[in-house]
Image: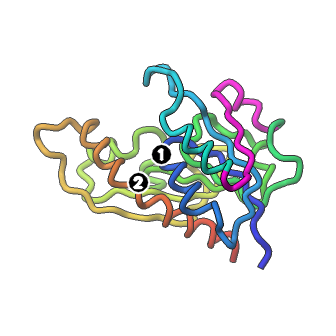
Amino acid sequence: MKKLRTVALLGREPGLRVLQDVLIDNPLVELAAVYTHPNLPKKEGGGPRPELARYEAVCAAAQVPLHRLDVAQAKSLEQMLPEHRADLLLVLSWRSILTAAMLAQARFAINLHRGALPAYAGAEPVRRAIEAGEARVAITAHHMVEEVDAGRVAATVWMDIAPCPPPLSAAEYAEEVKARLLPLYAPLARLAIASVAA
């Protein structure tokens, strides 16, 4: 079976998990390049991301090019992608909206979204699900289109949650739930890759 030539736009700890647990040494994937944001947003204090050194180590060991783009540079991503069109553009925790021209650089563009779609498109899906009294939350792989979080769903992984404990705010509880979701990104990424490799 021909491998999927893959370009990954990954951020934060979930992106690192997908990189090391799914994309490296995957028989379905030829990883052409990885792009990540090197710095934290200003609202989180700025400075280097704590996981950046691990991105660098994983990519160096696998001999995969790693490109570090801040948010301003990421707006010109289209000119920085590898020369040959990818089979798969895999996106997770990327801080810039991708244009139609960027999405056209791959046969398939899939985003891993921390929320059930279409109900929880957009920002803060976990907090919003908690505030709505949901008994479970999801992470969703969907095909990317110009409209944010509006593409066809490729796969969904669910996790049951208890109601928000009284001492915590929904935002505080959301951080706990997000940490519990971390191990689910790799299975979701595998399902997404299998859906386009079939």
Residue 117 is situated, as x and y percent measured from the top left of the image, at 47, 55
On screen, residue 153 above or below 54: below
Q: Are marks 2 and 1 in contact (CB under 8 Å)?
A: yes
Disc 1 element: helix
At x 55% / y 69%, what residue is drawn? 191
Front residue of 121/8: it is 8
Q: Which residues are magenta?
A: 61-78
Which circle marks residue 111 in the picture?
Answer: none
Q: State the residue position of label 1.
A: 13
Q: Choose top left, top right, bottom left or bottom right for residue 194.
A: bottom right
Residue type marked 2:
Leu
Front residue of 142/167: it is 167
Q: Earlier in the sequence, mark 2 or mark 1?
A: 1
CA–CA distance between discs 2 and 1?
8 Å
Q: State the residue position of label 2.
A: 182
At x 33% / y 62%, what residue is drawn? 159
Dot 1, crowdedness within 10 Å: few (<14), some or many (≥20)?
some
Instruction: Give yes or no for residue 66 being in the magenta stretch.
Output: yes
Residue 174 is situated, as x and y percent measured from the top left of the image, at 30, 43
Residue 121 is situated, as x and y percent measured from the top left of the image, at 48, 46
